[in-house]
Image (cartoon, rainbow, N blue to C red):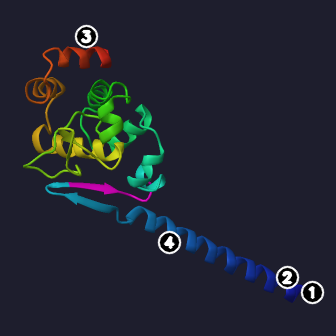
């Protein structure tokens, strides 16, 4: 009777405390879990187990997903791309809203040339432009370009930079501003 009840209560208490302790340790581990750090030259990008690329199986697995605004913005934020709305507008403009020949044949959504003097995700030159394993690598390569040449600029400075260095079209910045609703 009473002894069995005490043993059961004691057993339940121990199991409850043990379960709580395991859950608490797991929670603490999640707080201090090391992010997978990927380094490309001077650029360091951290992908945690809860990042979008990790959840989707990495950059290579993104090939099965079509490029779209939502995934592109998530990747840009994860890669710490500055001015992501401007960069998304560039991506749309440069890739003909993800449908251009360059986007389809080279997985190049930014009209990037194969760089010679910076870290790159480009697999080389194809048809005069950089080509990538998939569209996500194109975003990562843009992030590398940005971190090397156009980082920590105000929005105004950034627009000036891409208008002067990046764009071949004199109306490029105006088109970008129209796309983001700032014109």
Residue 183 badge = 3
Q: Residue 122: give x, y in percent of width and height.
A: 22, 49
- Mark 4 and mark 2 lie on one chain; the one further toward the N terminus is 2
Instruction: Give the distance between the C-alpha atoms of the residues marked 3 and 4, in whole angstroms.
Output: 52 Å
| Secondary element at tag 2 | helix
Give the mark, 1 or 3, whose residue is nearer the N terminus: 1
Give residue 103's quadrant in the image. top left
Tag in front: 3 or 4: 3
User: Which of 53/154 is in front?
Assistant: 53
Residues packed near mark 3 inside 10 Å, few (<14), some (14 to 19) or many (20 plus):
few
Q: Quadrant location of residue 149?
A: top left
Residue 69: give x, y in percent of width and height: 41, 32
Dot 1 alpha-carbon crowd within 10 angstroms: few under 14, some 14 to 19, many 20 or more: few
In front of the other: 89 or 104: 104
Q: Which mark is residue 92?
A: none
Quarter of the picture containing the N terminus is bottom right
The 10 Å Cα crowd at callout 4, few under 14, some 14 to 19, many 20 or more, is: few
- Closer to the camera: disc 3 or disc 2? 3
3 or 2: tag closer to the N-terminus: 2
User: Dot 4: what SS?
Assistant: helix
Query: Label 1 near label 2: C-beta < 8 Å?
Result: yes
Left/right placement of residue 99 relative to residue 90 reads right
Give the numbered dot on residue 25: 4
Q: Residue furthest right?
A: 1
Mark-to-mark CA distance, 1 and 3: 81 Å
Query: In the rendered image, which residue does mark 2 sit on?
Result: 5
User: Which residue is disc 1 drawn over?
Assistant: 1
Residue 108 relative to residue 99: left or right: left
Above-or-below relation of 13 to 90? below
């Amino acid at each position: 009777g009473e002894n069995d009840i005490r043993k059961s209560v004691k057993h339940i208490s121990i199991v409850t405390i043990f379960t709580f302790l395991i859950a608490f340790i797991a929670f603490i581990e999640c707080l201090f879990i090391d992010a997978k750090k990927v380094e490309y030259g001077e650029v360091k990008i951290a992908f945690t187990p809860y990042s979008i690329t990790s959840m989707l199986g990495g950059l290579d697995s993104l090939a099965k997903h079509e490029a779209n605004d939502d995934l592109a913005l998530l990747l840009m934020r994860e890669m710490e791309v500055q001015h992501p709305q401007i960069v998304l507008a560039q991506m749309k403009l440069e890739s003909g809203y993800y449908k251009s020949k360059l986007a389809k044949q080279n997985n190049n959504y930014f009209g990037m040339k194969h760089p010679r003097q910076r870290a790159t995700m480009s697999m080389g030159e194809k048809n005069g432009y950089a080509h990538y394993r998939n569209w996500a690598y194109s975003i990562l390569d843009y992030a590398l370009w940005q971190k090397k040449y156009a980082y920590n600029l105000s929005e105004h400075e950034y627009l000036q930079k891409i208008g002067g260095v990046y764009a071949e079209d004199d109306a490029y910045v105006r088109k970008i501003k129209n796309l983001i609703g700032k014109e």
